[in-house]
């Protein structure tokens, strides 16, 4: 049995009766269930069959790749879906509530209702898919690991470019080039390569700013490999740094290590957050760490579970999460250190192999 057949069968457990079908339009979810990675397509799953509906542009490619679902070439998604739903005597159609826009929903509601099909948009399909995607297969883990290897190779090489007089934007461009040169199909997100006072911005945008000696330089970076993301942050000093910078850096490092040491199957996600946050709070920087300690990573760069103060999720073996505390001092500087790890029964496997000791370039 292929991994895609297995995933669809697991999703079918959420189909309460033969009168109910599932309609999936999120391209990441379609890839997860079929192996077909394109921006257009609709996956229809009934209790007995599954259909991937694509237009002329993607039919040949989908026919070669998809083996677990019937591939259909269509010109009108709703008309084709109605025909299939009628064939299978479907009365209720469950949609991804996070994907369908208001205008799409209004259109779907009118056209499907005209055919006697009721729509379900209560979020149950989104939650069912989220629950499946929480746990990574061996193939998914391998893809994430490869994405991280590509990221680390690019990071190591780009350190040669981090020097006074260089532009933030230039470092971002060079990183993207190096990742793609090493096999990445793209970058995980808009890379964060920021310097000086801008490092106090958790999601600062690289621009024309020049690196100066004495600056911290933060790189939040990741590569995309076979649809899967990596995510890593390192902060380095340029030529030198003062005692306050060193102290803040070491506080963040201690917080990150304490958070990592908490990661284990059976532990509540908020416990990891608390372990890191307590270190930062006790050091006097309580108001300088305003984001969650981590998040899940996979087909999306931000997935469940969230490692946040309010998270009730219990970590389980097979989840992939980041641990990334930071301290951001307004109009001065900031430090973030981030690793990506696989949760195991006994602790974690760290995908990130690079040193976390303060590097001065």
Image: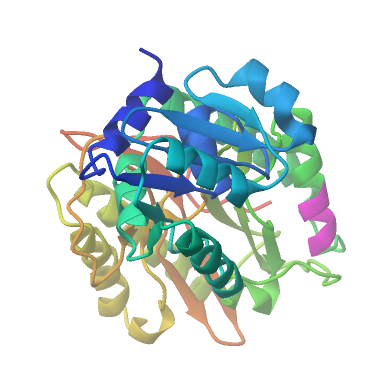
Where is residue 152, by image quadrant? top right
Q: Which corner quadrant holds the N terminus?
A: top left
Tag count in the figure?
A: 0
Camera-nearest residue between 226 and 163 = 226
| Residue 351 screen position, x and y as percent | 43, 35
Where is residue 199, by image quadrant? bottom right
Give the residue drawn at x 40%, y 15%.
Answer: 2
Q: Looking at the magenta stretch, what is its main secondary structure?
A: helix
Residue most toward the left? 266
Camera-nearest residue between 220 and 180 = 180
The answer to whether residue 262 is seen in the rendering is yes
The answer to whether residue 353 is seen in the rendering is no
Q: How is the image coloured?
A: rainbow
Q: Is residue 155 above or below residue 218?
A: above
Q: Is residue 151 above or below residue 256?
A: above
Q: Tell me: 173 left or right of 275.
A: right
Q: Is residue 200 above or below residue 138?
A: below
Range of the magenta residues?
168-173
Camera-nearest residue between 46 and 111 = 111
Give the residue drawn at x 85%, y 63%.
Answer: 167
Q: Tell me: 214 left or right of 260.
A: right
Q: Is residue 138 above or below residue 253?
A: above
| Residue 157 screen position, x and y as percent | 73, 37
Give the residue drawn at x 79%, y 66%.
Answer: 211
Look at the image and say whether residue 325 sits in the magenta stretch. no
| Residue 185 screen position, x and y as percent | 71, 34
Give the residue drawn at x 68%, y 69%.
Answer: 215
| Residue 103 screen position, x and y as percent | 60, 73
Q: Tell me: 212 left or right of 359.
A: right
Camera-nearest residue between 240 and 22 = 22
Q: Tell me: 342 left or right of 151.
A: left
């Amino acid at each position: 049995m292929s991994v895609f057949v297995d995933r669809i069968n697991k999703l079918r457990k959420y189909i309460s009766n033969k009168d109910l079908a599932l309609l999936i339009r999120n391209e990441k979810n379609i890839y997860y269930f079929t192996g077909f990675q394109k921006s257009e397509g609709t996956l229809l799953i009934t209790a007995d069959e599954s259909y991937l509906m694509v237009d002329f542009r993607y039919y040949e490619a989908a026919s070669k790749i998809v083996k677990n679902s019937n591939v259909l070439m269509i010109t009108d998604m709703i008309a084709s879906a109605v025909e299939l739903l009628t064939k299978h005597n479907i009365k209720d159609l469950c949609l991804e509530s996070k994907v369908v826009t208001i205008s799409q929903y209004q259109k779907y509601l009118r056209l499907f209702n005209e055919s006697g099909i009721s729509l379900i948009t209560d979020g149950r399909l989104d939650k069912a898919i989220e629950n499946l995607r929480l746990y990574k297969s061996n193939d998914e883990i391998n893809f994430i690991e490869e994405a991280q290897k590509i990221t680390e190779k690019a990071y190591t090489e780009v350190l040669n470019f981090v020097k006074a007089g260089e532009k933030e934007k230039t470092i971002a461009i060079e990183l993207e080039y190096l990742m793609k040169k090493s096999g990445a199909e793209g970058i995980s997100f808009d890379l964060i390569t920021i310097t000086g006072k801008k490092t106090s911005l958790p999601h600062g945008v690289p621009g024309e700013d020049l690196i100066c000696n004495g600056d911290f330089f933060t790189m939040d970076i990741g590569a995309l490999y076979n649809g899967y993301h990596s995510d890593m942050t390192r902060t380095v000093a340029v030529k030198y740094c003062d005692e306050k910078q060193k102290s803040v850096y070491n506080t963040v490092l201690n917080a990150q290590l304490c958070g990592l040491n908490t990661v284990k199957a059976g532990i509540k996600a908020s416990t990891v957050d608390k372990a890191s946050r307590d270190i930062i709070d006790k050091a006097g920087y309580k108001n300088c760490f305003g984001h969650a300690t981590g998040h899940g990573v996979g087909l999306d760069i931000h997935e469940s579970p969230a490692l946040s103060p309010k998270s009730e999720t219990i970590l389980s073996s097979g989840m992939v999460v980041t641990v990334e505390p930071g301290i951001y001092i307004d109009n001065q500087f900031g430090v973030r250190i981030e690793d990506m790890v696989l949760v195991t029964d006994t602790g974690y496997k760290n995908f990130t192999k690079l040193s976390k000791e303060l590097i001065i370039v």
